[in-house]
Image (spheres, grey):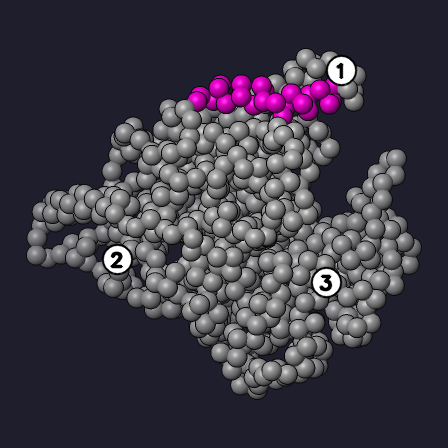
Amino acid sequence: MPGKDIQVRCRTCSCCRCCSVPHPRGIAGAPAQRWVPAQSSRRRFCNAASPLACRVQRESERERERTRERERVRHLLDTMPAPDMDSCRPDLEDEDGDEDEEFVDILQERRESSDLSHALRAFNPVPYRGSTACSTRDLNTAVLESHYLRYIAKEIAMETGASVDEVKEEARGILNEMSHNLQLGFIRLMGFMLSKVFKRLFQNIYVNLEGLNRLKQAFQEFPVILMPNHRSYVDFLVISFILFTYDLPIPVIAAGVPLAGMKMIGEILRRSGAFFIRRAIGSDKLYWAVLSEYVKTIIRTGFAPVEFYVEGLRSRTLKSLTPKLGMMQMVLEPFFKGEVYDITLVPISISYDRVLEESLLAHELLGFPKPKETTRGLLKASKVLQEDYGSMHVHFGRALSVRRLSQGSINRSHYNLTPRDLPQKPSADMQACVSQLAHLVVRAQERGSILGPWSLMACVLIQNPVDTLTEQGVAWDQLTENTLWLRTLALGFGARLNWPGQIPPLDVMSSSINQHHSVVRRRGGHLLLVEEAGLPGKQPISSEEGVAWRAAAVLMVASYRNQALHVFVRPALLAVAMETTKSTQRDELFAFFGFLQDIFSNEFIFIPGQSTGDFEEACSLLEKRRAVHSGPQEIKELEAGLRTTSFLRALLRPFIDSYQVVFSHLLEEGVNTFPEKHFLPAVRSVAIRRILSGELHSYEALSSDTQKNALSVLLRLEAVTKFRTVEQSRFRVNRSAVRRIGDVLSGKIPLGTLKTPPDARL
């Protein structure tokens, strides 16, 4: 599908409409088609009228425009045709439709009208037609008195020797810790507070109207599962804020239990719809039973939409994470058991110009401990309100029918042989279906994401040596030319860009640089990386510590590059395969392409069973750019496309280098077995030594997430095995297997030398 420049309608400018003064907070708020660089930030008035008359006229125009806009949005939501649920297809080729979607800034009215009136207005969302009226207390009672939980309680009592009443009392305590207490009064309080906060943090929050209409229809048909990506703590707040703004049902949201411990804030979140889950459940049979029954009861009764993050955790690298299947299995089980006719999954893509936690995330990747979530810590972080975080785009994707997508792939009849209230282990085909649906949702999130200019600039910047970035910098003219070239490439590959077309590219890029002043700065005609200054009052005491502080800035830039990787990763894998194998044979390239997909399956999202489609997509995209000639038997690289293929290979080079660092550490003498807790510090130490010696140029090898992903791949390929001792978990290394995988990845030996070619999931 061709890429799109997303055209957003902006009416938030507070300047005189008959002037060409830019919005004081940057380009995103500038009056469309009249923007010119201003010599002064003062407000100027038209000579045709006095300032007072001009202001009165402006206020009158704004009030009329606000009224027209509210009527237009309501009319669109009420009259647009309902989406055809039968059109949902597993390949998601038409996920975004053939026409540009219109985005509306929901902060516009908040800046021009009363937040209190907005919070206290009538709120009457249309509920799911199959829902049964019940309170939160009724919901909890239904969970505790369910046949399923009674059965589990008896099992646990027999296993532990405790009485059934004691187990039930423990279950009640778990449910009290976990359950939400959704109340409209607190929704209104959150609506008022978030209006204030969001107006300080963001210039705009854009939402697609077509997505809201589809969601409104879906809410009335079947139980709805809202599935946003997770990049910031703001994510679950903004979804509820949008739904409250448009009179749509407020969801109950799965949140981490540490948030419940925040004084006052935890209770506000609970009464705004959050239910809290422990991060490490392990083998706690009773906790799993209470959580599972709680979630399934919400879905069966249609109490409220359920919102959770299929990635499980907040992505510290700002790219999609491999989906976690525990919660996914819970929400789909009522459909598998025939307790509901269908379930609707709604992928939601939240895209940020700048993420609030960018520095915190980079330091966590370098091994710094994550700060504990406390109310005091939240208040200390109030300085973020002084920063400009640009715009946020929230894209509500097409509703996915579980019934439609699972048709023909699962057999639900075996559930008929066992009472529904008894626990049943999901069959292999159902586990495969859950995994397939989870990956489909994450891919839909990626396709709905919107890239800003800074993401493209980060792709270009990060390919320069770090010494160049920190010392002389990158020439501004060179950066501009490469970014505009990349913009064309991204659009050709199907990216959705938020690039103001009516504003000169230099001004767009300058605005992005100003917004990310904590990471980069201009000096003369060059752009330099801002190095970390270290802890307050502390200077680097060693070269190793200096590397870590420099790496923090590199990882922040890399995280914004990661936002765009899903656009380029498939053609990039093919470009690497062509360079590594030195072959033009289509079969050989496809085999190595599959090998790379399997090696990097924890880094990037590939839908299980669709490696052939991914390969054909990569061939098609590179052929359109005249980078390759693709025939039935051969794929030849063309000289005209060397710039494209070189750029794509450079995108994947940091990941390849990082994995090779892990492999080389495991091949060192004495590393036959090692405890789990020693792995990350040891690999980080190896990476720092190589950076200081000049052997390694990629600071991204210091990222703990990349190191964990490399170890996970080796575990799956059985090159490393995990075993448990009395004291701790340990790993055993199959050195010959690790060496072969590393040599194949680097092209030293052909893929066929692996005893068992990786074909695990793809």
**Considering the numbered disc 2 on the image, is that residue within a helix, a strand or a loop?**
loop
- How crowded pointer 1 is (Cα within 10 Å; few <14, some 14-19, many 20+) is rated as few
| Farthest residue, direction right | 670
Q: Which residues are magenta?
A: 134-157
Residue at image position (83%, 41%) is: 729
Q: Name the foreground residue: 347 vs 567.
A: 347
Residue under label 2: 31
> At label 1, which amino acid type do we have?
Ala
Left or right, residue 734 beside residue 448 = right
- State the separation of the CA atoms marked 2 and 1: 70 Å
Which mark identifies residue 162? 1
Q: Is residue 604 among the parts visible in the rendering?
A: no
Q: Position of residue 319 (x, y in %)?
A: 57, 55
Left or right, residue 76 beside residue 564 = left
In the image, is residue 445 above or below residue 160? below
Left or right, residue 394 beside residue 37 = right
**Considering the numbered disc 3 on the image, is that residue within a helix, a strand or a loop?**
loop
- State the separation of the CA atoms marked 3 and 2: 53 Å
Residue at image position (68%, 24%) is: 152
Residue under label 3: 759
| Total numbered labels placed on residues in the image | 3
Q: Position of residue 674 (x, y in %)?
A: 86, 48
Which mark identifies residue 44? none
> At label 2, which amino acid type do we have?
Pro
Q: Is residue 33 among the parts visible in the rendering?
A: yes
**Considering the numbered disc 1 on the image, is that residue within a helix, a strand or a loop?**
loop
> At label 3, which amino acid type do we have?
Asp
